[in-house]
Amino acid sequence: MGQLRYGPRPTVDREVTATKIGAWSTSLTATFLTDPAVVAAVLPPPLKPPSQPLVKVSISHVDLGGGRPPFGAGTFAVAARHRDTEGFYPLLMPMTTEQSVIGGRETFGEPKKLADVTLDVGEGLDTASTVIGTVSRMGVGIIELGGTLGDELAPPPAGERLDYYLKFLRNPSGEGFDDDPWLVYCTRATETRSARAVDAALTLRESRFDPVVDIPILGEVTATLAERRSTQEGRLVERVPAADVMPYAHQRYDDLSPVGNADK
């Protein structure tokens, strides 16, 4: 019998290995203020509303190098706090490849979903100074962020940022989770080698599956285009009662069942 690849073999968590190496990405990132009541409403316990109701949207082209194909990645996150820390709680992390979705969801608890994510700078657009990023899911272009490149900016110093995730699995009985979820701290060490201001407009569109449009844009949208890379490290912080998280589990899953209610 030849090699049986489904047989036992040493296991390496390639998601953790890959995120510790870091890959360069070109990222279009926008921030805006929203309604504090909206932020409070979308945060599951034990997360609390932040000092400022900030929303961050990023659309990236990630270059893995080594002959591996690049992929598109996005984040739609609201600011949050836990104990004496402040960070962001992503509501949606669209990705273009199955590999980038599964590893992040199963290892870190990231709310990743398959999507079409594109970032175009100059080439094929109106002018060389035009940049457009889009996210489409289930036939709907839910996020469009684009504008005109502005001045070169001094790259920010290397630093760290914190994201909060809730890691859980649904019970096969159809009732609740199979255990109390974990709150995960994901710390990213980020290095930036170039940055430019962007005079940008952000459009959020209606979707039954990804209701980003429910987060109102209040005031100015501030955007930058940057080349950066980051490495990440996750750690389990505390168990969260399943009853506290269950009302928010829908944030992660699409209701594609024949009996799904299109109004929910």
Image: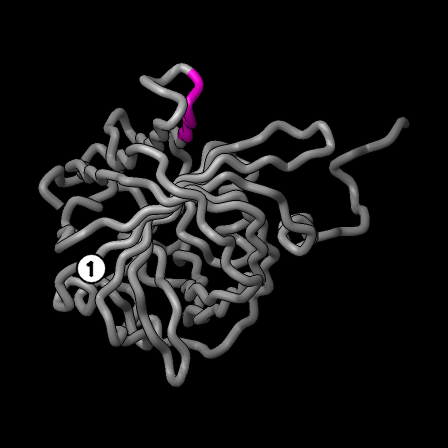
| Front position in the image: 99 or 70 | 70
Left or right: 31, with 179 as reference point: left
Q: Main secondary structure of the magenta part?
A: strand
Query: Relative to 158, is 111 above or below?
Result: above
| Front position in the image: 232 or 61 | 61
| Front position in the image: 234 or 3 | 234
Residue linked to disc 1:
33
Q: Which residues are magenta?
A: 118-123
Q: Position of residue 137 (x, y in %)?
A: 31, 31
Q: Position of residue 159 (x, y in %)?
A: 54, 65
Q: Residue at x 66, y 48 (%)?
A: 18
| Front position in the image: 109 or 234 | 234
Magenta span includes 179: no
Query: Relative to 159, is 118 above or below?
Result: above
Query: Relative to 139, is 195 above or below?
Result: below
Q: Position of residue 97 (x, y in %)?
A: 51, 33
Q: Position of residue 193 (x, y in %)?
A: 58, 48
Q: Residue at x 62, y 44 (%)?
A: 23
Left or right: 132, with 238 as reference point: left
Q: Residue at x 45, y 70 (%)?
A: 182
